[in-house]
Amino acid sequence: MEPTQRIWVSEGDCRLEDFRRLVERHARLADYPLASAVHSNVLTYDVEDIQRLGAEPESRKELLAEWARALTDGPGILLFRSAFPDEAVVDAASDRFFAMIEEQRAGLGNAGDHFAKPGANDRIWNALEKLCLRDPRLFARYYGNAAVALVSEAWLGPGYQITSQVNVVNPGGEAQQPHRDYHMGFQTADVLARFPAHAHRLSPVLTLQGAVAHCDMPVETGPTLYLPYSQTYELGYLAWRKPEFIEYFNRHRIQLPLHKGDAVFFSPALFHAAGTNRTPDVKRIANLLQVSSAYGRAMESVDRTRMSVALYPALLALREDDALNPDECANAIAACADGYSFPTNLDKDPPLYGLAPETQAQLMRKALAETWPASEFNAALEKSALRRLA
């Protein structure tokens, strides 16, 4: 059965030969007439062209359409040279970020990371808010950037929301494992198998990944590794952990050296991984941008913590009376508690033991299975809720 006809997919459906047929292609500059160059299947755009084309309605639409095609069915990766042309702004933001890192080291200790060993990197969670509150004038100059706004709208439409995590790979910091990103990239294979195939196709269009280089990044500093066209493989969220796909990535990935102020934007479904920093003294710093669609939200605001406090003692009593079976209890929890780890405050609620923090629903299921008294569950729920606050 063709992938587009499948409803349920699993790791067993992943075939390296199918993957190879999709990724072993070559981008032609003639197919992307607004790009200035293509190297190793990476489309390059110059900031002067971006600003000029973005200033006129018709050329703006053409530019955004070209980027949307490139991210969907093309190489899946765009390089913007000198996207931040004023290096003084980048340097000022770097100074702020390094000051935050020193404060973290003094006060917070070790923080988790998604795809690298804790402590291998210095990570600033929610760097967007922290920069805005510390230096709103600098924030305005930094995020007044035309390239960031244009590519975000090209992929997500208007109303998008930006988040930012600064990542510093220190000298000797080892490479990440190849992966896909948020949303489905943060789920385990058994969870992903419960999502229908159309949800696997939907996940990449909910977010856009970006990285702004805050220092020069020659290859020896370990800039990010990419596998162009890998975002086109529908089963990639199930495939990226499989040894044969990891081996293929390691043999065929490209590495993109960057200059300070360059920016890369790519589909979250593109296989990628931070590289090993082989230098003795360069702290490779990048501002990782994750831009989300305006549509990834519920219609109503719901206080699920308050609901969970009310529901838990009722579930205890109903289960004790055999009025609800375990499946029915799980269904009630799913309707009540927050079943997703995000958004959260990753400083206080880091992914120390997996790809994502514990959810309200997981906490309630654990409490019910272990027959916690309501007071114990309420205390744990309150701590969980506090950890998620900005």
Image (cartoon, grey):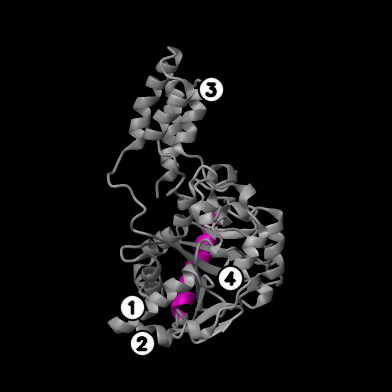
Which is the main secondary structure of the residues drawn in magenta? helix
Q: Name the residue located 36 percent from the left edge and 26 percent from the top edge.
A: 311
The tag earlier along the polypeptide, 3 or 1, is 1
- Disc 1 crowd, CA 10 A, few/some/many (<14, 14-19, 20+): some
Residue 297 location (% of width, % of height) = 34, 50
Closer to us: 123 or 176? 176
Q: Residue at x 44, y 56 (%)?
A: 202
Magenta region, residue range: 88-104
| Residue position marked by numbered label 1 in the rendering | 61
30 within the magenta span: no
Q: Which residue is mark 2?
A: 52
Q: Which residue is mark 4?
A: 228
| Distance between the alpha carbons at the discs numbered 1 and 4 | 24 Å
Query: In the image, what residue type sits under mark 2?
Result: Arg
In front: mark 3 or mark 4? 4
> How packed is label 4: few (under 14 Cα within 10 Å), some, or many (20 or more)?
many
Q: Are marks 1 and 4 in contact (CB under 8 Å)?
A: no
The answer to whether residue 50 is visible is: yes
SS for dot 4: loop
Distance from label 3 to label 4 (Cα)?
Answer: 47 Å
The residue lying at 67 percent from left, 53 percent from top is 242
Amino acid marked by disc 1: Lys
**Labels 2 and 3: the sequence-earlier one:** 2
Q: Earlier in the sequence, mark 3 or mark 4?
A: 4
